[in-house]
Amino acid sequence: MTCNSGTLGTGAGAQYLRGSRAHFDWPDFRASKHACPPKFTLSSEIVRMINVRYMVTDVEASIAFYVTHLGFTVRSKALPAFADVVRGELRLLLSGAKSSAGRPMPDGTVPVPGGWNRIELVVDDIGAEVRRLRQRV
């Protein structure tokens, strides 16, 4: 097998690197004689996490919501600009207007909350979960 040394996301494991699966089962490139290792090195903690950036209007209020109501834990925070919260293998990067993610795009567009990023939290009874959240929030 010839490895493509060109870019990230080619060769063995490309489907994982592009995030095309809802659950990431990262291949062990070191153990395979046939897979081409990626041309980068990441710590196992980062490789095993799915990272989703959310633009938010109030980072501190967002931390409170995710921790109190959805079972996340705070990994780090740099208020008022940024925080990241974790639940299992999901890491949410909560980015306020003063974060690096809040900088204008090359065309001048300023990122704002309400984009198209979505996460899925699996629950046993969606109706009960909606009622629980409505009572608490």
Image (tube, helix red, strand yellow):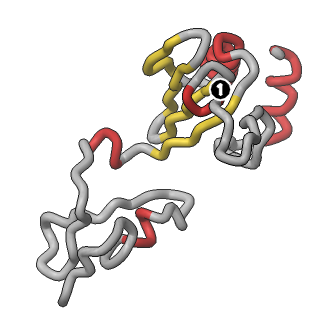
Element type at mark 1: helix
Residue 13 in picture, x, y percent from top left: 35, 71
Q: Which residue is mark 1?
A: 70
- Nearest the camera: 29 or 68? 29
- For the point 65% across and 46% down, which residue is it? 106
Residue 62 placement: quadrant? top right
When the figure is inspected, residue 59 is found, relative to residue 70, above or below; the finding is above
Residue 87 in picture, x, y percent from top left: 51, 32
When the figure is inspected, residue 122 is found, relative to residue 111, above or below; the finding is below
Total number of numbered discs in the rendering: 1
Q: Residue furthest bottom?
A: 1
In the rendered view, does 120 fall on the left or right side of 10? right
Q: Residues within 10 Å of mark 1 (few under 14, many from 20)?
A: few
Q: Is residue 120 visible?
A: no
In the rendered view, does 46 fall on the left or right side of 57? left
In the rendered view, does 43 fall on the left or right side of 64? left
Residue 9 in picture, x, y percent from top left: 39, 69
Residue 114 placement: quadrant? top right
- Nearest the camera: 40 or 66? 40
Q: Is residue 3 visible?
A: yes
Q: Quadrant of the N terminus?
A: bottom left
Residue 96 in picture, x, y percent from top left: 66, 22
- For the point 58% across and 23% down, which residue is it? 99
- For the point 50% across and 20% down, which residue is it? 73
